[in-house]
Image (cartoon, rainbow, N blue to C red):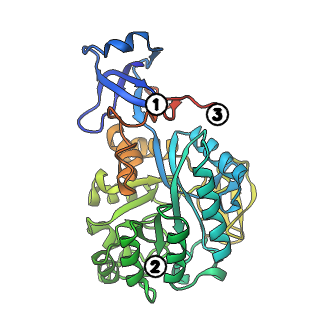
Amino acid sequence: MITNARIVPEEGEPFSGWLYMRDGRIAALGRADEEPPPDAVSARRVDGEGGWALPGFIDLHVHGGAGCDFMDADEASFEAITRFHARHGTTGMLATTLTASKERLDAALEAASRYMASPMPYARILGVHLEGPFVNVRRKGAQNPDFIVPPRPDWLEDWAARWPGLIRIQTLAPETEGALEYIVRLSELGIVPACGHTDASWTEIRFAADRGLRHAVHTFNAMRPFHHREPGAVGAVLTDDRIMAEVVADGHHVHPAGVELLLRAKGSGGVILVTDAMAAAGMPDGEYELGGLSVTMRGGLARLRDLDILAGSTLTMIEAFRFAVRKVGVSVAEASRMASLNPARQIGADRETGSLRPGKRADVLLLDEDLVLRRIWIGGREPEL
């Protein structure tokens, strides 16, 4: 039982109170002047010291960390990545792939499926986000051009048959040949269609949204920018309420004013904080690899070697959360929604996690008044991190 904390509930304003966890679930929460359930008398108590109790963060776009990548497709890498990000407040994530061969994507999907069937002692893998390989080479960013191909419906049917329900999001360029039909099929399979690494026009994004597109990957980055005579993909994402917008809030991918513009256009209910973290997250400066491409990290900023192109990030969710509050000026409750509830809702996991509500999993963070992460519970248990 956490006492003396500012509770951020699913609905309404934060309040000073307590939160009671039992059997891996949130059993009850209440204001300071409300009595907890009788069985909470024997609960171990944690003094929140006036800090914040928040739902655990859910990262829908994360490639790796601690020197490992989900494309490594082995249990040790999955464990290292989930442990590293759990240390920084992430309690659930989508294992995110890169543009690669069908064989390597198959291996990553199989590894994710196997890992999800294990106990998962750290941040839980909630599914897979396929980023590519059906993207536009003109906006490839740090995606490997050797493996960019048009949408392959036969690949999708194979993935859906072999690993039903595993893929939760797929990123593609909706202007490519066959993409609109592919988006329709993604929606039919319950997979969130996302635009990213796209040179689509405003009109092409709107047509895609008519067919089920409802997610934008790292908004502003690797997509056709806004122009007052051709609003581009960015303009379509900003103005179409059907599309949820990811943003990498690290001050490098998007200026704070850009994040503020996104929030003014879509509101905190339409924005999702992600890390887009790569293997170099949590590691010293040096040379790394992303999807077979050489990456140099200097001062925590990862770029393709000898090119002025960002290659993922070294961001963590607690840093993105603090950036939103301190640099963009959103409230703690708004930042929490963008880091937890919105991503949970986007992949249909909000009945189970994403907010502090009785009955949900006890994925809970305790922050101090300065937004420093102090304690983490995943399923009501404090993992050894």
Spatial CA distance of label 1 from label 2 is: 40 Å
Kindly report which numbered mark, 1 or 2, lies closer to the viewer in this rendering: 1
Q: Residues within 10 Å of mark 3 (few under 14, many from 20)?
A: few
The residue carrying mark 1 is 24
Mark positioned earlier in the residue sequence (2 or 3): 2
Looking at this view, is 182 or 309 the one in front? 182
317 shown above or below 214: above
The circle drawn on residue 173 is: 2
Give the quarter of the image for residue 295. bottom right
Give the quarter of the image for residue 185. bottom left
The residue carrying mark 3 is 385
User: Where, quadrant-wise, is the N terminus in this rendering?
Assistant: top left
x and y percentages locating residue 138 in the rendered image: 53, 83
Helix, strand or loop under label 1:
loop
Residue lying at 63% horizontally and 62% vertically, measured from the top left:
110
Spatial CA distance of label 1 from label 3 is: 18 Å
Q: Which residue ends up furthest to the bottom in the rendered image?
A: 177
Q: Do the residues labelled 2 and 3 touch (CB within 8 Å)?
A: no
Q: Residues within 10 Å of mark 2 (few under 14, many from 20)?
A: many
User: Where, quadrant-wise, is the C terminus in this rendering?
Assistant: top right
Residue type indicated by callout 3 = Leu
Residue type indicated by callout 1 = Gly
Residue 28 in the figure: left or right of residue 93: left
